Image: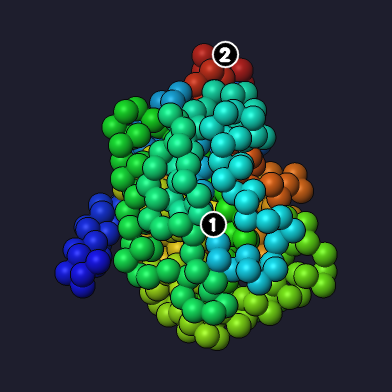
Amino acid sequence: MTCENVTQMERQLRERIAQIRPADEDAAAAARRHSDRLTKPPGSLGKLEELAARLAGMTGKLWPDISRRAVLIMAADHGVCEEGVSAFPPEVTPQMVLNFLEGGAAVNVLARQAGADVFCVDVGVNADLSHPRLIDRKVRRGTADMAAGPAMEREEALRAVLAGMELVAGLSEEGYGIFVTGEMGIGNTTASAAIVSVLTGMPPERAAGSGTGIDEERRKHKAAVIGRAIERNKPDASDPIDVLAKVGGLEIAALTGAILGAASCRRPVVVDGYISSAAALAAVRLAPAAADYMIASHLSREQGHGPLLEAIGLSPMTHLDMRLGEGTGAVLSLHLVDASLRLMQEMATFESAGVSRG
């Protein structure tokens, strides 16, 4: 890849980011006024009322059409697994990708319940995969060990980000009205914690959680590996692409692009757990207005997730002690999104029901 091509990708990313506008405050205010006319005390439905207003602001429509919803599972492998940071071997990544494609994973079950379509994307799986439903956007076969050097080249991170943006743009044109982030990649909580540590200043000891279920001794080892990777690579916190390239992952970069793509298309994006939230943080650092289009689905059991959501400016809808990833918590939250819109559309107003106001 030549410097000219990298420059071209940088320009392409800037042009797409420039399309992201803040949410429509007039539409959000109209939704709040309508909510106050419904037969209930003002604000009594809590986050559901605010969610309906935010959805109006995102889309510019009082009652947006989100009947077609897409779950995007970005998959990639991580060289940092060589450092012994995960309870599962790297071979699980391609095995789980095939499980997604055959509809047998938890996210598939929950997506069917929520009426969502699952799209599985190979951004960097360290295997040759073939399946009629697989979306091939492979940039490289997994990242390098970030504890020994950069996880990937800058142009590779850019390619992954742009792949995520292009996928969402295409699905938006097909009529998908809301997006859900999901991922698969053994070792990706380590990369996510490294991204969070760099972009927020959170110590690796705080950013590193139990991931796939490692014990406390290995968690401390994981934090030490993250600290060593940051010290060795010195990622620039003011440059999210540099951070993604040096200590990130290909699926995280692709999710960053998908979130930016949703914002540029004025589509809501439901953010899953810690890994997806790390991508959301990178997206916000690239385009602050992208936060207007994010819905935080749940608070995971990863210890750094709460402070991470606070850094983005998001409040989670639920807290179910989940830490599976895949997009499971975000898909569950689609039911709350549906509820918020149905309340707006189907509840009677004080006037129509002949109910006296308080």
Q: Residues within 10 Å of mark 2 (few under 14, many from 20)?
A: few
Residue at numbered disc 2: 353
Which of these two is toward me, 48 or 21? Answer: 21
Residue at numbered disc 1: 77
Residue 72, visible in the rendered structure: no
Query: Which residue corresponds to the image point at 50% horizontal and 69% vertical from the top-left?
Result: 144
Q: Is residue 204 left or right of residue 128?
A: right
User: Which of the 4 image quadrants contains residue 8?
Assistant: bottom left
* Residue 252 rendering spot, x and y as whole percentages: 49, 57
Which of these two is toward me, 19 or 147? Answer: 147
Query: Which residue corresponds to the image point at 54% horizontal and 18% vertical from the top-left?
Result: 346
Q: Quadrant of the N terminus?
A: bottom left
Q: Nearer the viewer, mark 2 or mark 1?
A: 1
Q: CA distance from mark 2 to mark 1?
A: 57 Å
* Residue 62 rendering spot, x and y as whole percentages: 40, 30
Task: Assign a secondary structure to mark 2.
Answer: helix
